[in-house]
Amino acid sequence: MTEHAEGIDLRLAEAVNSEVYAQVRTRIFRQLLESFIFERIAPVESIQLREETLFILHGRDEAGMPVTYNCRGERRPTFGRVRLNASPLQRISREGKREAVCLRRFLREVAAGAGADPAKLGAFAEELERTLLHDAIAQYERLRAEQTMEGSYDELETAAMDGHPYHPSYKSRIGFSPEDQLAYGPEFGPLLRPVWIAVRRADAAFAIGDGESFEALWRSELGEERLAAFEATLAGKGLALADVALLPVHPWQWRNAVIPRMQEELRDGRIIPLGPGGDLYRPQQSIRTLHNASSPAKPSVKMAMTLLNTSAYRHIEPYYAKVAPAISEWLQRTVDRDPYLRDEAEVILLREFAGIGYEPKAAKDGGSSPSGRDAAAEGMLACIWRDSLAGYLRAGESGAPFHALSAFDPVAGRLFIAPWLERHGAERWLRALFERCVLPVAHLALAHGIGLESHAQNMALVHRDGWPSRVALKDFHEDAMFYRPLLSADDAPDFEAIHPAFGEGVWFEQREAAPIRYLLLGALYGINLGELAMVLADHGVLTEARFWTLAAETMDDHIRRHPELGPRLALLDPFAETTRLEQLTKKRLFRAEPGTLMHEVSNPLHAAVQAIRDGARAGVT
């Protein structure tokens, strides 16, 4: 064992034995219980105390004896979400009352009795346990290094490391070893060089934006000398650049998925290794997306990884790689013909302008490859190139990922945005955030019938000294959706013509308008802004009621300024009394048809706008 490996082993042991480990475990338990109560996964007994609610979840231990889990908190005005306080979760059984410390036991005792699928329960327990290990390592190292949240947009992607604020398995990363966590986790800011490969064009699904070429992209990414070396390797195999598609592979994916599982493809020359690229990259919060640390204005690369993280595999299916440029171009056309989005909001779309996915010809033809591994290979090798935010920033502008806005910096001992709120005033700053960053996403839905998955990881705040200037949006290739009767122009991509996989079922086009509204209120307002609302209230900045009043006022003002939106509100009313949110935790425990695990929740914008309008009427009388 090398001295370096021994040092890593000691650091991992220190993290597990630290107080940070217990703090992370408490956080995971808190988010798990909050989601259980909010999503109504198991029966909950609620007892209202003076200033808080006692929540009691009932279950049975291995001997079939009654057991309860008790926690304290409250239902919040923000979509009725549940927030537990910092007191430990108590497990009460025949052995007495103790702090609950075993996540797997909780699932066995409570979720199993609620009808959870046994196999899914076991898999979810592993996700929670790996989240505990991975986040404990990350948080321990942050405190050990006294790493504060500051720097450029790309640096904040590393420093804002807390993960999903609602989903309890926010750092599961199933497939990573503890050493992988240190080597590839974004929290540690590693510098990586992807491995470049070539696949025959007949075995690839690929597309690039209008006016661009793959050869020019590869030349820009690799440089003349390295590209010439790769061409020489190909020539030795009787191939020219025109015969192949070149794409980078994440080094973890190369070592842990490609080499172990695609040996026959490597031996028969269907996958041709070329070597590392020249530029160094750092991972963003999504892990599989790397930004170019050597040349920040160059594109980011989103590469497939056979990794389960936050309850989703991080493959990139070849049809999603191929459709990415068409979706980005369509969204850009929509922005360009809308004076509000183009000239007033100045929305930035970080285009996914090129994509390549390994798709063996036999699989395209409906057969199987000689190795019989097409099913396993689908989505294992793919890359999408995305614009860098650095190329859009003007003099004096900076960027910050939206997930940093609700983050607490434990080293500095304050909210990340605290200096901005002190400098500009909390209400003025929030109103600017809503006007410059939130309304453009809502306008895209209301005026154009297009919904985007605008959770915090997919949005960036562009600011000047903390003051909101405009918004940058990204990650469209899988989750953009539209309702054709509400499109402002019938120019959506012909998805089936791009790839036959889009010929059946519901993909991007929805059969009704409701999913667009659910996505707007769920992803953007429910989780993204909802977390900010509760964090600001918890830190005494302003109440949730005031937060949602400001949000409703800016939305109401926008609708009045754009009367053409009026007739569309019957289908896309952002002020509806209720909306539907996805049951993220329940999905991990129960088998159900896609899209069916959703629950009806109250909409705080409804109560806020009613109060605004009632006040206006009272003022008139």
Image: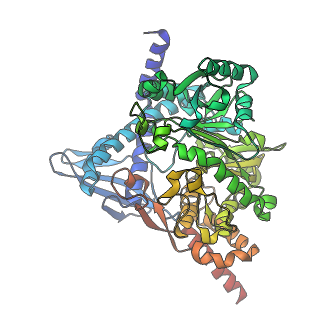
Residue 158 in picture, x, y percent from top left: 61, 35
Residue 350 visible, this orientation: yes
Is 17 situated above or below 514?
Answer: above
Residue at 59% over, 72% down = 572
For the point 55% across and 62% down, which residue is it? Answer: 509
Residue 570 picture location, percent across and down? 59, 78
Camera-side residue of 404 and 611: 404
User: Which quarter of the rendering shows the C terminus?
Assistant: bottom right
Q: Is residue 92 left or right of residue 471?
A: left
Q: Quadrant of residue 436?
A: bottom right
Q: Residue furthest bottom?
A: 621
Picture coordinates of residue 139 (x, y %)?
51, 33
Front residue (pair 318, 21) = 318
Direction top: furthest residue? 2
**The N terminus, quarter of image:** top left
Residue 287 seen by the camera: no
- Front residue of 116/6: it is 116
Q: Is residue 268 left or right of residue 206?
A: left
Q: Count all numbered tags in the image, as a single digit.
A: 0
Q: Quadrant of residue 243?
A: top right
Q: Is residue 502 above or below residue 196?
A: below
Q: Is residue 574 left or right of residue 467?
A: left
358 versus 57 height, above or below: above
Given residues 526 and 46, the one toward you in this image is 526
Residue projecting furthest to the right: 395
Examine the image and state in which quarter residue 299 appears: top right
Q: Residue furthest front?
A: 238
Q: Position of residue 148 (x, y in %)?
A: 63, 34
Residue depicted at x 77% and y 62%: 337
Colour scheme of this structure image? Answer: rainbow
